[in-house]
């Protein structure tokens, strides 16, 4: 004979417990999902920098890399020769002028002879 007690296990209680846990799990998951969306929306509205370091400028600071260094050197030497061999204002506000280097050397030699 295979008789057992029927009051030890209540199938109805097991089913109701499973349904209760399932409903509670769904409610908890929906609540957490809603809470994360709320926090994300609040965080996106804040204007807070993640770092105090300034964003780098898209243009690098001076001096930049030269594309044609030989041509740049030639242009620089030409402008320096132009400055050394011409008359012009060194500082108009202070009344200082620039004279050609050859003329300046001649004037120094003349002053030393005196």
Image: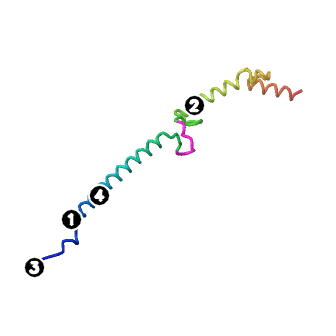
Q: Label 2 crowding class (10 Å Cα cut-off): few <14, some 14-19, many 20+? A: few
In the picture, measured across the screen, residue 38 lies left or right of residue 103, that is left
Q: Secondary structure at mark 3?
A: loop
First in residue order: circle 1 vs circle 3: 3
Q: Secondary structure at mark 2?
A: helix
- Kindly identify which numbered label has been placed on residue 72: 2
Query: Is 84 or 63 nearer to us in this picture?
Result: 63
Mark 4 vs mark 2, foreground winner is 4
**Would you name the residue on which mark 4 appears?**
20
In the picture, measured across the screen, residue 108 lies left or right of residue 86, that is right
In the picture, measured across the screen, residue 16 lies left or right of residue 93, that is left
First in residue order: circle 3 vs circle 4: 3
Whether residue 56 appears in magenta in the rendering, the answer is yes
14 versus 112 height, above or below: below
Q: Quadrant of the N terminus?
A: bottom left
Query: Is 17 or 101 nearer to us in this picture?
Result: 17
In the picture, measured across the screen, residue 96 lies left or right of residue 75, that is right
Whole-Å distance between the Cαs marked 4 and 2? 82 Å
Whole-Å distance between the Cαs marked 1 and 3? 23 Å
Whether residue 31 appears in magenta in the rendering, the answer is no
97 versus 50 height, above or below: above
Whole-Å distance between the Cαs marked 3 and 2? 109 Å
**Would you name the residue on which mark 3 appears?**
1
Residue drawn at the location 46% of the way across and 41% of the way down: 44
Q: How many marks?
A: 4
């Amino acid at each position: 004979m295979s008789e057992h007690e029927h009051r030890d296990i209540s199938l109805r209680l097991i089913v109701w417990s499973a349904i209760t846990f399932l409903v509670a799990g769904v409610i908890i998951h929906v609540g957490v999902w809603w809470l994360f969306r709320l926090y994300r929306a609040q965080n996106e509205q804040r204007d807070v920098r993640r770092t105090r370091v300034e964003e780098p400028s898209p243009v690098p600071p001076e001096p930049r890399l030269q594309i044609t260094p030989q041509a740049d050197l030639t242009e620089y030497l030409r402008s320096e020769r132009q400055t050394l061999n011409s008359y012009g204002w060194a500082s108009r506000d202070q009344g200082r002028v620039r004279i050609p280097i050859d003329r300046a050397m001649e004037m120094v030699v003349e002053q030393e002879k005196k």
